[in-house]
Amino acid sequence: MKPCNFEIFELQADLYQTMASPKRLAIVELLSHGEQCVGAIAETLDSSVSAISQHLRNMKDKNVVVTRKDAQTVYYRLKNPKIIEGCHLVREILLEEMEAQGRKARDYDEETVLTN
């Protein structure tokens, strides 16, 4: 058997590290519905524009989001929509585990996850 090439695992771990923030996961969820500007994201997540800008800068540096500028406004969107599929899969695993432990999971459907 050939030795394992860890390059893909290192890249995967780097992506997980980038996403290891509840705020960034919420940003991904918001952007799964389409591009948004920093101000709209900050308002929805009840955060400061500077805090959200910092998260978005990190996510852009790691190729999670891309930008489009329209006059003075910068819009962000997911670079690859498959990232939301991964986030939803992990969420399903966590909810199944909660139920298996007898814990009641709140209603976390995709439409209301950011409004509850």
Image (tube, rainbow, N blue to C red):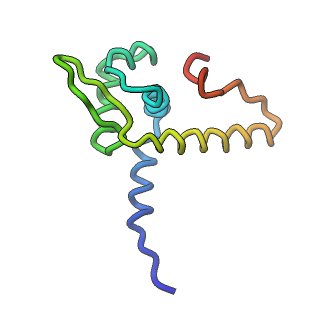
Residue in the image at 45% along x and 32% along y: 28
Q: How many marks?
A: 0
**Residue placed furthest toward the bottom:** 1
Q: Quadrant of residue 59?
A: top left
**Residue placed furthest toward the left:** 71
Which of 59 and 112 lies nearest the eye of the viewer? 112
Q: Quadrant of residue 12?
A: bottom left
Which of 77 and 16 lies nearest the eye of the viewer? 77
- Residue 115, x across and y down, in percent: 57, 16
- Residue 23, x across and y down, in percent: 45, 29
**Relative to 115, residue 9 above or below:** below
- Residue 37, x across and y down, in percent: 32, 20
Residue in the image at 60% along x and 44% along y: 90
In the image, taking residue 102 as reference, residue 96 lies left or right, namely left
- Residue 7, x across and y down, in percent: 38, 66
**Residue placed furthest toward the right:** 102
**Relative to 93, residue 77 above or below:** above
**Relative to 5, residue 77 above or below:** above
If the image is split into quadrants, where does the C terminus sit? top right
**Relative to 4, residue 88 above or below:** above
Residue in the image at 32% along x and 44% along y: 63
Residue in the image at 38% along x and 36% along y: 78
Which of 12 and 32 lies nearest the eye of the viewer? 32
